Image: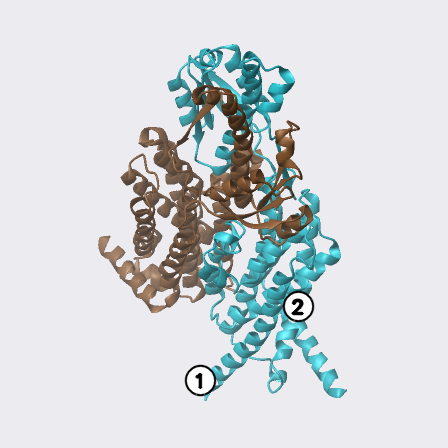
Chain colours: A cyan, B brown
Amino acid sequence: MKRLYTYLKDIWYTFCLELHRIFSDTGVLVIFFAAGLLYPLLYSSIYHNNNLEDVPVAVVDEDDSADSRRFINKLDATPDVKVAYHCVTMSEAEKLFRQHKVHGVIYFPNDYSSKLANLEQAYMSLYCDMSSFLYYRSVYMGTNFVMLDEMKSIGIKRYNLKGMNGEDAAKLVEALPYEGVDLFLSSQGFSSFLLPAILILILHQTLVIGVAMLCGTAYEEGKHFLPKRLRHRGVHRVVLGRSTAYLVIYAGLAAYGMILIPHLFHLPQMASVTTLFYFALPFLLATTFFALTIGNFIRNRETGVIYLAPLTVILLFISGFAWPQSNVPLFWQWVGYIFPSTFAIKGYVSINTMGATLAQIRPLLVGLWVQAGVYFLTAILAIKWSRSRRMSRIN
Amino acid sequence: MLQTIKQVLSREIRRIVSRPVYLVASIGTMTLIYVFFLTFMHEGLPQQLPVGVVDMDNSSISRRLARELDATQNVQVVAKYSSFAEARDAMQRGKIYAFFLVPENCYSDILAFKRPTISYYINQGYLLGGSLSMKSMLTLANLASPAVQRELLRAKGFNDEAIMGLIQPIVVDTHYIGNPETNYPVYLLTTIFPGMLGVIILLLTTYSIGVEMKKKTSHGWLKAADHSLGIALIGKLLPYTILYFFLELAGIATMYLILGFPMNGSLAYYILAVLLYIVSMQAVGVFIVGLAPVCRYAVCYATLYGILAITMSGFTYPVDAMYPALQALSWIFPIRQLFLLGTDVALLGSGFAETWMRVVIMMLFILLPCTIWSRLKGALIYQNYTQK
């Protein structure tokens, strides 16, 4: 009984000590709170515009016929594209393109309508701005949807000329109609796609970098050593005490990033608070113990940041999020399993954007719990290792 | 003066090799980034994305659709499901990006002109995987009706030319300006590489100056420079400028010479612009450490600014689509200028005449340290900021 009491008291002691260290260190506060609170707001505002709407394009209509004008009007009516300029020559359009005033040029040659009238295939040209994937996607999709729509009505007319009447022609033109459904994201938005991953990555990176800074500072000041009163007791209570301090802070930040921000910015939130809790718990535990393990090898306050900050972009890709998981090379998939963010990004997107249940993401949760267990042990071992190294140096 | 610069320079080189952080953080990190992204995206555009089929008809036409989908380069059919619910579950588990559903009696309905509808379902939770599999699904869906038409028209005795006029009256000839292969890594790597180098430049510039105050060695530094801050900065930063330039050259050589990324303009001009970008990022680093002459804070602020810079370059999400206030914010990042210059030179083949504005703006960043000149000098002399 008494041992349990001392055990809890030791944890409480390291917990308070760690909180004190966090709140007396402005640099760590900047990483935890300024970055942890402002980055989600900033990134949500950057990607606020769910869809890239009305991308400006220029039209060069050498045909100037009812057919080409109908095409242009339909194009202007799509949500993807806006016909911003009508140019007389291609060189005029090219100039606008080079000045970035338009992100696409649509060209109708002067035989467009005559070819249609002669029942031949009519050609038109589309020039896409490839400086951004999203411009290309909007201009390409918008033009192709209008083209398919036009083809349908022209096709019906042609069948009529061949002596097939309305209903039969329509049936033939669309012998096998199709419909496309976007599951999970009705808006196909960029923010709903990217932000959930970024929110998780912000939690992961601020926690790891902040802890690394604390560990580096402690080492510089010679305080990384166990507090005197704990010297001959188990190291795990130090790990538990310190982790509890981070968990208390990050429980708040996680609720902010995973619940409040999606609510404020109308991002998909299909997971219930309970589901999010069962997901966030292993995520935060794994990240904390991971950070404590790494922190033991950091000798300077600044070097931790210098090594860890550039990894952020790699973590986003390795998670199989920005790049399809099925196409991540096997070697990098295994490297990805080292970082809690890999499982967490996929897990959060699955439960919150796609409404998956905890059972459906079980492999990811198991991954996070295994990481939490392994990194808890390595954190203890790392502290023991650096203690014995230091002891041998003193002797 | 040259003598004093040389003095600071050799002092700095001794410092660089005395601790691993400088070389590991620059050469090590950039090598990791190059190796990572080049092995990661070796395919160019992701191919053979996993998709599924819900075949409730099990006829020759449904099997043919599945075969044709499987034959496209972008996707491969990895599974057949017996119900919608099963396929949806596989999608939520992240096994497939898309599936299409062929309803019961599809084949007999086609023959009876009842126009059965095939549906495809896309997981838009993953932008790239979703978009690419959607392109394949759409192509297939648009080919399905014409294929049926072609069979029927041939049976009626039409010749092939007349058939094409009927089933595809309009042909769109698409030109992908500057990137004819629609190579996806071109979008990412041309900005991620200089962007990541920028983060490293900021971190190491703020650190290498900040640590002089932290370890109270700034007097020795100024003394070597004959008490001129200008010479002190040039001597200190020059070895890094050369190092960063060679690191970036390695990336440029890989992208444009080995991988054959499009470069329609002058590569030499682009390389000069990159050199200017490197110097302007160093200037921003000096500015940050001048504003906050405390090593630990300067490094933190450099991180926050550097990571944001990559996003604000507009390489994933166009800046024009952001809030006006954020559009204005994009001006405080040199990478934004390099991105605009780079796409113009590489894709449109523009030269100095069209892009001189970008060069001028990047040069303005180099003047930034003037605004904190005396503050930084004071901090180096008096070491009066608590380094805790």
Residue nearest the observer in this picture, B181 or B34: B181
Which chain does the numbered disc 2 sit on?
A: A
Dot 1 alpha-carbon crowd within 10 angstroms: few under 14, some 14 to 19, many 20 or more: few
Instruction: Read off the chain for label 1.
Output: A
Instruction: Specify whether residue A127 is in view.
Output: yes
For the image, the number of numbered tags is 2
- The answer to whether B188 is drawn above or below residue B14 in the figure is above
Q: Which of the numbered marks, if any, corresponds to residue B10? A: none
Q: Where is residue B226 in the image (x, y as percent from the top left)?
A: 30, 57
Q: Residue at x 55, y 12 (%)?
A: A161
Find the distance from the CA under tag 1 to the CA under tag 2.
Answer: 31 Å
**Among numbered discs 1 and 2, the one appearing first in the sequence:** 2
- The residue lying toward the viewer, choosing from B326 and A112, is A112
Q: What element carries label 1?
A: helix
Query: Residue at point 30% right, 42% down?
Result: B272
The quarter of the picture where residue A15 lies is bottom right
Quarter-wise, where is residue A277 in the image? bottom right
What secondary structure is marked by label 2?
Answer: helix
| Image: B352 above or below A299 | above
**Residue A245, numbered circle:** 2
Residue type beneath disc 1: Arg
Horizontal side of residue B242 vs A349, given as left or right: left
Query: Quick one: which residue is furthest to the left in this view?
Result: B3
Where A20 sits versus B283, above or below? below
The residue labelled by disc 1 is A393
* Vertical comparison of A12 with B321: above or below: below
Q: Where does residue A135 sit, x and y in percent of width and height?
A: 49, 33
Q: What residue type is labelled 2?
A: Ala
Of B375 and A173, nearer the camera is: A173
Residue B116 in view here = no
